Amino acid sequence: MSVSELSSAAQDYLKMIWSATEWSATPITVGAMAERMGVKPSTVSDGIRRLAKQGLVTHAPYGSIELTQTGKDHAVEMVRRHRLLETFLVNVLGYGWDEVHDEAEILEHAVSAMMITRIDELLGHPVRDPHGDPIPSPDGQLRRPQGVRLAAVDPNRPLTITRISDADPDMLRYFTELGLAPDTRLTVLAHRPYADVTTIRLPDRDLDIDLGPSAAESIWVIAS
Amino acid sequence: MSVSELSSAAQDYLKMIWSATEWSATPITVGAMAERMGVKPSTVSDGIRRLAKQGLVTHAPYGSIELTQTGKDHAVEMVRRHRLLETFLVNVLGYGWDEVHDEAEILEHAVSAMMITRIDELLGHPVRDPHGDPIPSPDGQLRRPQGVRLAAVDPNRPLTITRISDADPDMLRYFTELGLAPDTRLTVLAHRPYADVTTIRLPDRDLDIDLGPSAAESIWVIAS
DNA sequence: CAATTTTGTTAGGCCAGTCTAACATTCAAG
DNA sequence: CTTGAATGTTAGACTGGCCTAACAAAATTG
Ligand SMILES: [Mn+2]
Ligand SMILES: [Mn+2]
Ligand SMILES: [Mn+2]
Ligand SMILES: [Mn+2]
């Protein structure tokens, strides 16, 4: 059975379960899934049960939720669709990086495998989406994402942004104003714990910026 | 209420009811709709009843099916989406004109108004889709389609193809082989009634072709 | 014009996905 | 270790979209 034959809801569940462990190790909960999908926990609980019946996840009542191999394959395919579509919307249709997530969230369920292939070719087989997230290859291969949260790095080392969470469009617009994007180089000057402020320096623009904790949690960096 | 809030099924019903009277005057029937959507007549009958309850069509049991003004507006918006998407798939993603209908049939329900606007701009506001069908403007204006079925024209007049029905992909591939497409110029040499064959001449390629009745019914032409 | 065929509607059932409300389990704080 | 809070599940209801089977109306035709 191909991923296209799953319902939109099932596709979203799988993608979300998979994504939960991409950048952090804490496994997903029913409550978190309900929150992020904008439905009630009972709906998710029910959905998970149906997914388990189809052999896409393993789950005992009150137990953890784990993808089977098939579930994983389908999830990665959906992630590929989502990220290619985001890249396409930015590079071809001129969307802002803050505008693409919701559109891709719908389109990913509607496009055919052929269309994904064509978009991938048109874009020249990109490996990262507009937010820096890795795009899985057609066979499910995936550069393991690199980087740590900005909030967790030592000061005074040269860094490069590898990804910025696309969860909050408002924050993305704010980052655009500040000139923060994947591949931007920066240095952490200091974490001020009780003020909950991280001060960063952009050497390329000779500019210092104070970031709050939600911003510093949304940016992943790597030594450069 | 915007057209995007309607279910896919409702959007397809409206589009189909509207389309039925675009190229021919015979109003649509429940049976024909069921046939074209691949569902049972009882399903359509039920669907029409729900559409009527929403004020999108008027329909008394066993009576004719008519769009209300709101229904018409939504239908035209869906036709615009469908035809812009087909054009986009051919012009930007390199699809063949025989491959776009089914893809557009799904995508039309998933794209946002913004995406349609961007596609329209990228394409330079096209007025015809790959099959020659007129693309409604954003406010619902529409060049009334011109042309008559090839099967119905008098012989020996210079003609230009204005549209080719996109209902049958196999036939479209056949037309591609023959070099028949919108804007192709031709002349009918003769209709041979009992053989059910229409012979046409392509003056630009100095070629005569015999077409069967289904082909001659699928091509619309105008005097040129 | 009556009978038969065709067409359309209704009744009743199924499934997915959603909800609220009630209940069960697990976790955490005292 | 107990208990109250947080979390998750189940029960029951509803909707839309689909089906089959039975029925009703309309159209065709002898
Ligand atoms: Mn989605
Ligand atoms: Mn992204
Ligand atoms: Mn459709
Ligand atoms: Mn078309």
Image (cartoon, coloured by chain):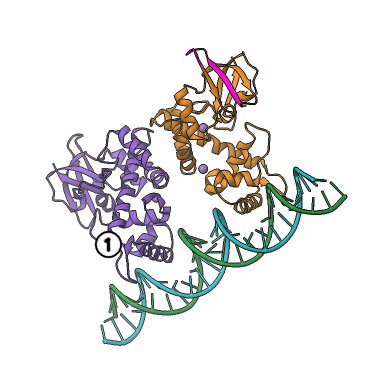
Chain colours: A orange, B purple, C cyan, D green
Quick one: A63 or B209, which is closer to the camera?
A63
Q: Residue at x 51, y 35 (%)?
A: A168
Residue at numbered disc 1: B27
Question: Is residue A176 in view from this perspective?
Answer: yes
Q: On the image, which quarter does residue C27 sit in?
A: top right
The chain to which mark 1 is attached is: B
Q: Quadrant of residue A27?
A: top right
Rendered location of residue D27, percent (x, y): 28, 73
| Relative vertical location of residue A146 with respect to residue B182 in this rendering, above or below | above
Q: Nearer the viewer, residue B11 or B178?
A: B11
Chain part drawn in magenta: A194-207
- Are there few (<14), some (14-19), or many (20+) residues within 10 Å of tag 1? some
The answer to whether residue A6 shows anywhere in this view is no
Please tell me which residue is depicted at 46% across the width and 34% down the height of the picture.
A85
Q: Position of residue A12 (x, y in %)?
A: 56, 44
- Residue A10 location (% of width, % of height): 57, 47
